[in-house]
Image (cartoon, rainbow, N blue to C red):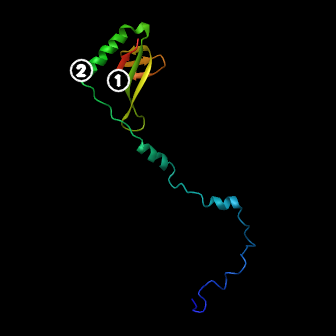
Amino acid sequence: MNSENPNPYADIIDLPHHVSTRHPQMPMEKRAAQFSPFAAMVGHDAAIRETARLTEEQLELSEDEKAVIDGKLQMIRAHIKEQPEVTVTYFQPDEKKSGGAYVTVTGFTRKIDEQRRLLILQNETIIHISEIIDIQELR
């Protein structure tokens, strides 16, 4: 740097912009694309959201609570031909990670499958009896 001229580029600053004769100028759309965000890890955002999604652990019912639910199921079984309307709260395991969520559904009872231990509602909701934490017969 020269002490007479404080700007080291003073000799070239006013020169015209160079335009190549060999390479055509890039269109504006392509120029902008080179500055777009780069997704180095495809799916990383989805993985972070999945990790952050909260699940609950399944409650362990006491023997008394299990007996109450069993008694209610027997009442429903006794009136199955009438297809009683019920509200059931049950644990629905998460398909992607440990834990799950508690769901409450209301519907008309279609069937109780004794062998597979399932409560099946007319709206095609299938509930594993072991996952029921509350059941109310509405009619």
| For the residues bearing labels 2 and 1, Cβ distance under 8 angstroms | no
- Tell me the element at label 1: strand
Residue type at mark 2 is Asp
Q: Is residue 52 above or below residue 128?
A: below
> Of the numbered discs in the image, which one, if any, rests on residue 132?
1
96 or 81, nearer to the observer: 81
**Left or right, residue 122 beside residue 75:** right
Of residues 99 and 65, the one nearer the viewer is: 65
Q: Quadrant of residue 8?
A: bottom right
Q: Tell me the quarter of the picture where residue 97 sits.
A: top left
| Residue receiving disc 2 | 64
For the point 38% across and 34% down, the residue is 100
Q: Position of residue 25 (x, y in %)?
A: 72, 66
Residue furthest to the left = 63
Residue at disc 2, secondary structure = helix
For the residue marked with disc 1, what is the amino acid?
Ile
Please name the residue shown 41% across and 44% down the image. 52
* 132 sits left or right of 30 in the view: left
- In the image, residue 126 lies at what x, y percent? 43, 22
At a point 64% along the width and 85% down the height, the residue shown is 10
